Amino acid sequence: MSDICKKRKLPELLCPAGSPAALDAAIEGGADAVYLGGSAFNARMFAKNFGGDDLRSAVLRAHSYGVKIYLTLNTLVTDRELPEFLRAAYEAHTAGVDALIVADLGGAAAIHRVYPEIELHASTQMSGHCGDMGKQLAELGFSRMVIARETPAIDLQRTVEESPIEIEAFIHGALCVSHSGQCLFSSLVGGRSGNRGECAQPCRLPFACGRKQGYPLSLKDLTLAAHVPALIESGVSSLKIEGRMKSPEYVRDTARIWRRLLDERRAATPEELKQLSEIFSRGGLTDGYFTEKIGHGMLGIRSDADKSQSRALAPFEGITKKLPLAVSAEIKRDTPCKMTLSHGEHSVTVSGEIPQAAINAPMTRESAMKNLTKFGGTPYAISSFDLELDDGLMLPLSKLNELRRSALEALNEAKNATKEVIEERKYLPLRSESKRQAHNTARFYSIDQIPDGAFDYFDTIYLPLHKHAEGIDGVILPPVIFEREMPKVKKMLAEAKKNGATHALVGNVGHLALVREADLIPVGDFRLNATNNETVLRLESLGLSEIILSLELTLPQMRDIKGNTAAAVYGRAPLMTLEKCVIKEIADCNVCASGKAILTDRRGVSFPVLREWEHRNVVYNSLPTCMSDKQDVLDRHNIINRHFIFSVESKKEVEEIIKAHQKKLPLKDTVRRLK
């Protein structure tokens, strides 16, 4: 064990709870904190969750054991939902939760404006993966960022060093194959939005490429149990176990092992890794992203054998864990009796009745102790007991019990008195006053796709930063830029600026500093998931000149958002951003380089896969959205800034698409519609 590992403060162990039983299981397993969802606005809407009195009870129960509670409000919200969203935040705060985990930038801005007392953690759905993201989030009122699961060890360390706010990292549980917050597959293909807590998990289904069929998008579950010393040395503040849809037995047993590893500051043994796999796995566990051994071995599906192992777990029958409690009491002549309870940093003293002179049978030390130490059914076990008792006194049994109950209630109140009580405040929505200026913009995957007519039809043309060419006025920043990649991106931006670039599409607020340094005009990409006026206003305050709205919005929702916004009116939507190269699973590098890789699902529907910078992949929708013959509908919804996404189209096809829009005619092929 290194000196750094010995000296570092242990990170918090953060465990999931999708039900009251799972909450108890997390406490039993040794969690320092638990995250759970309310009745709305959380990314696991199919868990049992906690609402109303259940939430208050959960907080009181956790706090009595010294465990913090974080509530997930980690879905995107629309303008109509924002008042309810703010009310949910207020109710969570009054219930005593220690922080809110938030995914919607505008929702967080509204909470911070109305209730600055509430602590905010940025959900992994915000796609945080670099220190600059932490700096931006700090300015926006966040105290913690949940970093991307794909972050390698070296980049985790650098992000912790660069970020002014705490970093929380996932260390065990299910892995989404797409970067969180960047997956639209379930939403646009299946009608169930992952960004709204309703993911149908299409990544767990089989796909084919030609004759080759398998599960190229289904990853094994994560575990970093072999890297506990490195995690401690990194300075990360919180270690998070995934699993709000998992059983109490999973939560209890996984937490127990991680608690032991952290307390002993050591890596898991082969036997402990085997135990973790037997608790729940998909053909085993993986640390591929953390160790940068990203390959076929990361894939896995849940087999019947895996399910049998999970079913064999010992049933969870409630909390057996007890907390040490120091008890002292004074029963003296002519003085109100007193009782003091002490646990950790909390100590309370309460007073009761004045004892009477005994007529027949005076109170004995044994009888007083018997009644004052009845703490069965509570979280406590007596660690010490001290009693000062004068001779010849009598106090009714009911008064002794009342004294004990009063002391216990005072101790629980002291543990929960961490938040100042605030009154509910009115939420006044904010809207941007900036005006739209009608124009068309387009992004292309390659310069070879761009016909001459595109320069007349589009006001700004964007190419991926690593493919930028002279004469193109816009660049698209990579969706993911880890710390070690920052110097490369800075160099490419400087080169693009020299070659005439003036605008940059930014899909992550952590990348804004790069664009400002390059002296380019930042434009908000749809990857920012802007779904409400508050988000647009906040992004404008960060210097974005225009924001392309979320691809999940309906036409009426877009219409009601003000500011200089645009909508993607043509193109195949990027459904997934993959750190693991799926093309290696379905083809070879020649197919990857040609841009002809395709995933075909079990219904025979094909999804193009294109290489991103640094060999990341993007899976695109099977059908393009197109409104070429519905431009009057766009006009009625005040969508006058229009963005086009060109991915696999040839130059000739692009020409035909432009002509169709110029003449307001439909395309020959089947398309999706904005509704």
Image (tube, rainbow, N blue to C red):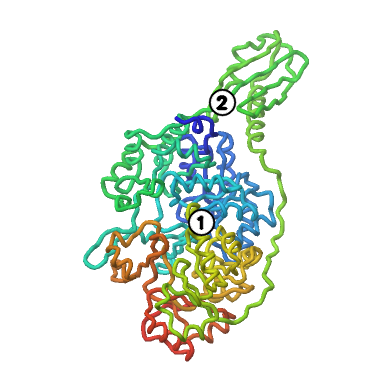
Q: Is residue 397 left or right of residue 160?
A: right
- Res. 460 image quadrant: bottom right
In front: 393, or 629? Answer: 629
Which residue is identified by label 1?
Answer: 487
Q: Is residue 387 left or right of residue 179?
A: right
Secondary-structure class at tag 2: loop
Residue at screen point 29% across, 45% down: 306
- Distance from the alpha carbon under mark 2 to that under mark 1: 60 Å
The disc label shown at residue 375, or none:
2
Residue 675 appears in the figure: no
- Res. 336 image quadrant: top right
Q: Amino acid at mark 2?
A: Phe
Tell whether label 1 touches label 2 (CB within 8 Å): no
Circle nearer the viewer, 2 or 1: 1
In front: 612, or 599? Answer: 612
Residue at screen point 61% across, 67% down: 544
Look at the picture and state if 350 lies above or below 417. Answer: above
Measuring from the top left, give residue 330's x and y in whole percent.
Answer: 70, 17
